[in-house]
Image: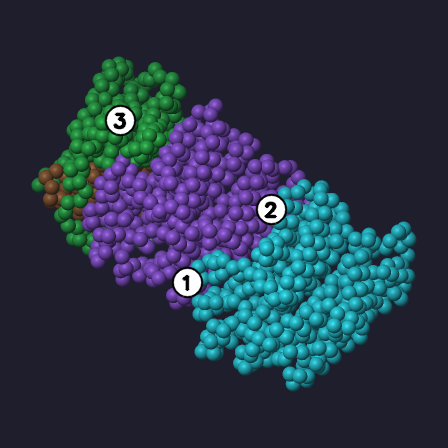
Amino acid sequence: MIGFYYFLSLILVVVSLYYFIVARSYVKRLISVNILGSGVFLFFVATAKNTTMENPDPVPHALVLTGIVVAVSATAIAVALILYLNKEER
Amino acid sequence: MLDFALGIMLLSSALVSLHSKDLMKSGVFFLIFGFLSGLIWVRLEAFDVALVEIILGSAITGFLIFKLVKGSKRRALRVSAFTKAWAGLVSLLFFLFMLFYLPTIERQDRVGRLVYENLHKSGVESAVNAVLLNFRGYDTLLEVGVITLAIFGLLALELKREAYHWDNPLLQSFSKLLLPFIVFFSLYITYLGTFSVGGAFQGGALLAGGLVFFALAKQSLPLKKSLILLFMATGLGFFSLVGLFYALLGYGFLTYPLKLSTLTLIFIELSIWISTAFLLYTAYKGKL
Amino acid sequence: MPIDLGYLVALPLLASLLSLIPSLRVYTAFIFSLLSFLLSLYSFIYTLMGDIPLYQWIGGWVAPLGIGFRLDGLSGFFLLMTGIIGFFVALYSFSFFKVEYQRQGKVFWFFFFFLWAGLNAFFLSEDLFNLYVVLEVLSLSALVLVALPGHRKAIKASLNYLFLSILASMFYLLGVAMLYANYGVLSMSLLSEKLAGTHAFTYALFPIIVALAIKSALLPFHFWLPPAHSSTVAPASALLSSLVVKPPAYLMLRLWLEVLPKDKSLEYLSIVLSLMGALAILVGSYYAIRQKTIKMLLAYSTVAQMGYLFLMAPLYYHGESFREALLQAFALQVFSHALAKASMFLSSGNAIYVARRDDLSYMPGFAHSHPLTFFALFFSGATLIGLPLSAGFVAKFLFLGLSIRLGFIFQGSIMLFGSLLASLYVYPIWRESFSSHPTKFYDNPIPQLMELSAFFLGFLSFSSGIVTFLLLQGIVRG
Amino acid sequence: MERLAVLSLLLSSFFVSLFISFLKEERVFLRSLVNAIAAFYKLFVVAYLLWSVYRGGVFEIRYSMVPFADFYLTVDPLALLFVSLSSFLWLITTIYAIGYLEGAPNRRRFFVFFNLAVTSTMGIALAGNMFTFFLFYELLTLSTYPLVVHRGTQKALRAGGIYLVYTILGGSLFMLCLVLLYMFVGDSTFHTGGNPSLRAWVLENPLWGKLLFYGFFFAMAVKAAVFPLHQWLTRAMVAPAPVSALLHAVAVVKAGAFGIIRLVYELYGVELVQSMELWQPLAYLTAFTILFGSFMAVFQEELKKRLAYSTMSHLSYIILGILLPGQLSTMGALLHLVNHGIMKITLFMCLGNYAEKYGVHKFKELDGVGKKMPLTTIAFTVASLGLIGTPMTVGYLTKKYLEAGAKAAGEEWAIYVFYISSILSVFYLMPIVFKALFGRSREDKEKKGLEVSPLMLIPPLITAFLTLLFGILPPEAISPLKWVQYIVNKAYGGY
């Protein structure tokens, strides 16, 4: 089962990498980078489960929490900048 | 089986969101993607992550992207075949590369066991929060720093933008009623963090969601701007002051003595809770 | 006696918050930049005399569980570099924001101190995941600094920078996740023990290297840098170009020399990196020579100068027996470029201040009107070329010597050729500042602090070559 | 005490430049005072060092600057020869420059770089190994570039560009050779009679040894303006007169020649240079340069350019003297290092006076200045005679030694080269004197008082006087000749 999740995370990363490169609008680029991030987080969380212990490893969970907050911060500022550019265009 | 179903759904929502020419559709599917990934975290027993993902990763990011979609022109620029080709090549190579890598991962105990062994010395009972606030508290300090930085950044640039809300009287009164509950519920979640699933970011994000809802319903908070600013800076300020305080006392930077650790951590959680909430709220509003 | 290294991070963080209070802004900026500078200086002096490497486990939690600070010769030296540049840029900014960009001056300090905290944290950190968060701190604060002028060009540049840097961060995080999955630790010192004799880490290395290459603008990923560094205000440009691109390269050296075991795949990687570095030197210099505006010229020169750090990658792989000399060369190249580039960007701010435009051909004849700025340009230009006594010369001497000793003729010749190219793009700046053409004479004075800080940075970059033995003692001992 | 003396020799002018750079442009008097005091102080230190080195004192400063190479300063007789020459001429030029630049803009910058250039020259003289030599050699480039472009005119800027191209290319070559030297041999210390470890290595790898020797030679030949590398020198004459005088007659070009002395005598060693026949092709090249320079000088309309070509030719006298085997030619070369400096600086200062007073820059404008400016013209005549090699002047001495040296080495052709060059120099110097003295008289209205300010008049007179004095002094007296003899005896007694 863990293997499936690893594979899923890999697919997410690869696909969003492709769309990141071909994206021509900021919105799509932002979405793809966010999905790429989710893929990486999935890798982390799958690793947390990939242990001999009964409970999953809490460290990756904490790291992913940090990662999500960081990603949201970056997204927030990107959104603000893009909105500004859009407004200028109009 | 459920895993496979979830996985396929997650993947297809991601694909739709990425591929769709219609930005609105992309946004909607991105929201769905966030929600589904929340479910997957639950399947993987990452309840804390799930909570944050659903509120932050899915709801708040989704809202932000919606705002963006509204303002963006819906025109799809042509992508040259060449770009597609090399993007495809790069991704394919990366895919193959990672495919070779995946089998090298082994099932093993990583730091997890150590966390559980030292849990009683951390001052909280929940393992994730022990890592977050104590064992790797320094990461969290910087994380609070990052979010503070980002939101102050967008304030500092003074990128003016118009407000966006729903004009619905029913919604307005509902939001007024709802807000106190959300405040208490988010505080409760924050408090839960000391011994179970929950914590400051989760609670803060929840409160932020409530505040955003409140704002969407064309309501404004009865708070002064300077107070909101203060709330926003509380997390980082308090956290780094605590770090400095213990360093000055000679315990070392961010090193809590065992007796005081629970108390300190609760205060830190509270400060992060309030500032996360107001930071995300401001992130949504885009201005004070 | 060692100090608590946490101060180096927490004090600037606190300062950034305090600087938001309008009535305290100036005092905060002054006191805390002085304090941070002194702290860096103290840590540097400690690396010269005290026990190094010094580990400090935050919260008392030792490595696999907690995060550590690590202070050694190299990090101490870079802390000093950050301190010096931070301090002088702060001095410059006092005057600069009084006479220009007053609105931006109100918020500048917040990001300035954040950046400083991030840099200190980066050089001290010992934990790979922690470095990810710090990288984010750095790139977000850099990004805001890029967008600071608020015009369309700046916003666009900062947005492009943001996207690439998020992508890079995600790649880096993926690499860290892979390492954690395989080895179960995040601390660099533990990792180096665990890596020995294994091969799986080479997979994880790939996304990490790509991420670091993007962040330090190595050639195929360099296109974000020139617009980002040239479109913002002078003190911000100075910080970005001198300091913000350096940490990724530093981390790479750290990994290379201290964490990764010797592995055949690394050799191939090092050759690839070296080729990219060589291309960066050639292409960056070529574009720098062709630029018509000062700031673009300087930004492209940053691309070229960063190339040297990667050009020498095969040496890091083959040169265990010269580890010390390599570290010294690396440290000096980073140091000299950082100081010189900061000084040049500050001087370009002075040029724009008097001439009101960025064109090279309208650059004021500083030699005749503003001697201090002229000296700043002169000394820092000499450092960029790598003329003796400058620290840049010593770095190039060492790099050249090591590449010959280890048989890397290609790298050596590119290095020499690169400094010839550097003289080609520095020369126009010198020529214009000497020109006594009447249209280039401006007699309006520049605020003294703006001139002095540019001058001292240039002077230090040039004269530090003569005391390298003193500056690098920490590295020799470590 | 000894270290202090060496350091203060090096740093006195550096501190002056530092001090001046913080002084306001208007503080003329203080600036001049500080300059003069430092110059006198330096002379004093030189005298002290001369005395103690003669008595066998050893002075050195050495520390490891970079992992492979040492920063190494040492005071040996050869260094002192160059040091005393440059610090004496520095004093003279400083006085001259104070007068010459009176009222000109940007004097502060001028003196800052002037002093930096002198510091580098001192460093070049005192350098105890090739690494240190290189440091100061490049620093000299850096500090003289601003002097060349001092006026900031288009012409000056272009000249500066060419100067940089040549010197930076030369510097790169130098650096490459230096690095190779360190990587293969690991040591670049100057030893009387040659560096032993280098010698061992060269004997093993003769090809590399040869290449390295030529590399070093051409890197220094750039500054010494040997034939294909001389373009910068003639163009650099746009610089103000004191710059041309000190830097392009003494410091810069002589730094190249001095480097070749160190290279031949103390790095490779005469024995090696001779046994490997490294010197021959270079000797032909320098001989050609002598003739080429003299020949070109004859046709130069611009007076400073004429002197520049003459400098080029005379520098090659020195280099040829170094390359020719045997004690006598060595003595000739070392003597000419000093003598040419004294004579050439006189000429430049005199030209500066002409230009300052009557705006004379070209040959045809010279008419009649001789009568208006008798003292300057006397000095000019004396120095010209010296350069030609007339008896009773120092020029005669050097020429005799060089010719004797060529004879002793069995290279008779060189004697003819010297003869032809002497004849050519009559053709390029004497017309100036004649035109100045016997040309049409000038119609400018009479100006009262001295022909030029005493600050500009006394220095050339002193050097002209020395040209005569050292020429007629008996061999026993204290003079450059005696010191050169001492050096050569030590050098050739070394093995």
User: Which residue appears farthest toward the left when viewing the image?
Assistant: B1
Indicate the colour of chain B.
green
Q: Chain of mark 2?
A: C
Q: Circle 1 — which element? A: helix
Judge by depth and name the residue closer to the eye, C367 or C151: C367
Q: Secondary structure at mark 2?
A: helix
Q: Which chain is cyan?
A: D
Identify by letter the chain in purple.
C
Task: Pinpoint residue D119: horizontal percent, then vertical percent.
Answer: 62, 56
Nearer to us: label 1 or label 3 = 3
Left/right of residue A15 with respect to residue D117 in the rendered view: left
Tag of residue B264: 3
The residue tagged 1 is C402
Depth check, front residue: A30 or C322: C322
Disc 1 vs disc 2: Cβ atoms closer than 8 Å? no
Badge 3: chain ID: B
- Residue that badge 2 annotates: C374
B236 displayed left or right of D255? left
D67 versus A8 height, above or below: below
In this rendering, position of residue C149 left or right of residue C177: right
The image shows residue C315 at horizontal and vertical percentages of 37, 60
Q: Residue B68: horizontal and vertical position, in percent?
A: 34, 32
Q: So how many labels did they put on this image?
A: 3
Of the two numbered discs 1 and 2 on the same chain, state the one appearing first in sequence: 2
Above-or-below relation of D436 to B33: below
- Please identify the residue farthest to the front as the structure is shown: D55
Chain with brown colouring: A
Distance from Cα at disc 1 to Cα at disc 2? 34 Å
Q: Amino acid at mark 1?
A: Leu
